[in-house]
Amino acid sequence: MNELMISDLYTVNATYPLDSIHLKTINLLYQPLIGNQACSLYLTLYSELDQLSLTKAASLHQRLSKLTGFSLIEIKEASLKLEAIGLIAKYVKDDDNKRIYCYSLKSPLTPAKFFNHAILGPLLLKRLGKEEFNRTKLCFKSSAYHLDGFQEVTAKFTDVFDINLMDNNDKVLVEKDYFGIEYGKVDSDYDMELFYQGLADYQIKRSSITKDDQELIKQLGTMYRINALDMLSLVKESIVDDKIIQKELIQKCRNYYDLKVPETFKEIYHRQSVTYKSNSSNDALNQHIHYLESVNPYQLLKDKQGGREPLKRDLQTVESIMTSLYLEPGVMNVLIELTLSQCDNALSRAFMQSRASQWKRKKINTVKEAMDEAKVYIKYRKGNYVEPENESSDTIIDNDSVDENELDEFLSQFE
């Protein structure tokens, strides 16, 4: 791929007018995905249409750099993002030892097509989060007039027009796009050739795959990283009466992704900070404390399930609490054990959030402190806990206030 030179020329073309909906779509839907530099370059190129139309001559990239304030490297990077997401098609030619680029601007997808796009819609949801995503959708909704009691009387094509195909007749109705609008496409190198080669093996008729189905398959395959052979199996399961049920295929691809490509978690792989580790000892209590300080929450959950992978739902619960309250991993380990012991071996999100927020307010940072708090909770739940005089409810109980039998009972719940 050639590097841009300041002496390289450029010209721009487009076949559509940019209206307020296009601008809102670019700013609210495309910008979160490709960034403000790429969107700024797109709008600048569009504004260049008038200047280039008047002069009928290509401009230097130096001008584009001055207009945007971007370096040539930044212009190239922004251009690549626009090309990849379908807003620009780029062409180049050499003319009299000069290199000329043509930026062909494509119309942004309509909001409805963007939100329903198999790749762009889910990516925007992931980028913004569910709450902001829904707020963004509201920006494109207009208040609909209720048509209860109305009868539709809209004229049909044949009610108004006749088509006259007689020779030497200049009153022939020709169907065409008003502006010849070209919507950009998000292209990918998904291996459709391999997909079609495998149709016979899965007893799928070639006629069952329409043009729209093919586009959807490419989008889903790219979005959820599904190879052609696995996609064939999912397509087979989504066919009813030799027709692909697209909603069914989309759901199966999402389920495939959730099963095969688990979410990337970070906090659950952390271990207790050295600052909050205790000195090891050989008695049962200190050995257990050392264990909880040495393993991360992921490994603890795995150990609790006999070496089997923890459920994604449980990992999400643990990660969510750790990242929102910044609990030490060792403290989270104690909370996991307490929750399992008190909630019939289930990780109750509500129980964990309640205890975690209380421990955070009490500034619990070590495994020892967390275990003391857990013992207080167990005694309180049994109705045996009496608030010490002249001490706040945030006070951690003294070790001596729990006898050895109670300690053994507490530890046995975590085995």
Image (tube, helix red, strand yellow):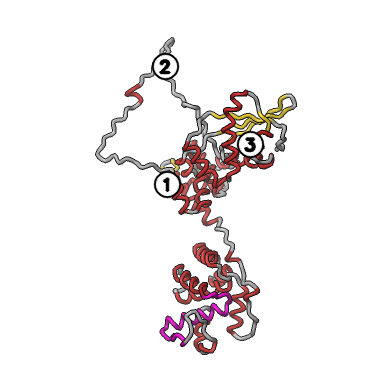
What distance separates the C-alpha of mark 3 from that of mark 2?
A: 47 Å
Amino acid carrying label 2: it is Val
Q: Is residue 179 above or below residue 238?
A: above
For marks 3 and 2 on the same chain, the one whose residue lies earlier in the sequence: 3
Residue at the spot x=57%, y=71% of the render?
300
Quarter of image, res 105: top right
Q: Residues within 10 Å of mark 2 (few under 14, many from 20)?
A: few
Residue at the spot x=46%, y=41% of the render?
111
Q: Position of residue 82 (x, y in %)?
A: 59, 39
Q: Position of residue 261 (x, y in %)?
A: 56, 55
What distance separates the C-alpha of mark 1 from that of mark 2?
A: 43 Å
What distance separates the C-alpha of mark 1 from that of mark 3?
A: 33 Å
Q: Residue furthest top?
A: 168
Amino acid carrying label 1: it is Leu
Q: Is residue 201 left or right of residue 78?
A: left
Residue at the spot x=58%, y=45% of the render?
35
Q: Is residue 5 visible?
A: yes
Which residue bears the numbered disc 2? 172
